[in-house]
Amino acid sequence: MLYTVALYWQRWRLEDAFNTVKRLLGLAYLWTGADNGVCVQLWATWLLYAMLVDLTDAVAERLQQPMTALSQEMLYRGLYHFTQAFQRGAASDVVEYLAAHAVRLGILMRRRTAALSKFAQLQLLTSAAGP
């Protein structure tokens, strides 16, 4: 049973990777119909994705957080802010910059509070009403 759950988790990690590559990195549309052009676009996009995963891992390590606590999309968007700071001379290391501004840039995801079950909501409503 645990093996099946682990396989299912890996399946969703693959789905997330394809979704990121397609939506965020622009692989939803091919620039050309030529075989060589398609191959170049595929390789370049997957290389960019691999670098994004490595960068996410490095920032997560710097923040001492699990990689799943970081948003790859917001980290990718945070690269724009780093380039602006780099050009102003305010930043030189991308990992340090993104880790220092992780909350402001939305890279570090907020912890979600567990949703109360309907039964727990009813208990709270009835206990708050009092006698």
Image (cartoon, helix red, strand yellow):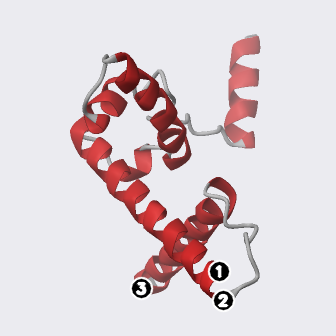
What residue does disc 2 label? 35
Asked whether disc 1 touches disc 2, contact meaning CB atoms under 8 Å apart, the reply is: yes
* Mark positioned earlier in the residue sequence (3 or 2): 3
- In the image, is residue 94 above or below residue 23? above
Asked whether disc 1 touches disc 3, contact meaning CB atoms under 8 Å apart, the reply is: no
Viewer-proximal residue among 95 and 108: 95
Q: Amino acid at mark 2?
A: Asp
What residue does disc 3 label? 3
* Mark positioned earlier in the residue sequence (1 or 3): 3
Q: Amino acid at mark 3?
A: Tyr
Distance from Cα at disc 1 to Cα at disc 3: 36 Å
Q: Is residue 128 left or right of residue 17?
A: right
Which image quarter: residue 70?
Answer: top left
Please provide percent x and percent y for residue 10. 48, 76
Decide: few, some or many residues near mark 1? Use Cα within 10 Å; few <14, some 14-19, many ≥20. some
- In the image, is residue 75 above or below residue 4? above
What residue does disc 1 label? 38
User: Disc 1 vs disc 3: which is toward the camera?
Assistant: 1
Q: Amino acid at mark 1?
A: Val
Q: Is residue 11 visible?
A: yes
Please provide percent x and percent y for residue 121. 72, 32
Q: Secondary structure at mark 3?
A: helix
Viewer-proximal residue among 25 and 63: 25
Distance from Cα at disc 1 to Cα at disc 2: 5 Å
Asked whether disc 3 touches disc 2, contact meaning CB atoms under 8 Å apart, the reply is: no
Q: Secondary structure at mark 1?
A: helix
Residue at (23%, 39%) from the top-left corner?
62
Q: Is residue 37 left or right of residue 4?
A: right
Q: Secondary structure at mark 2?
A: helix
Please provide percent x and percent y for residue 4. 49, 85
Residue at (53%, 39%) from the top-left corner?
74
- In the image, is residue 83 above or below residue 31? above
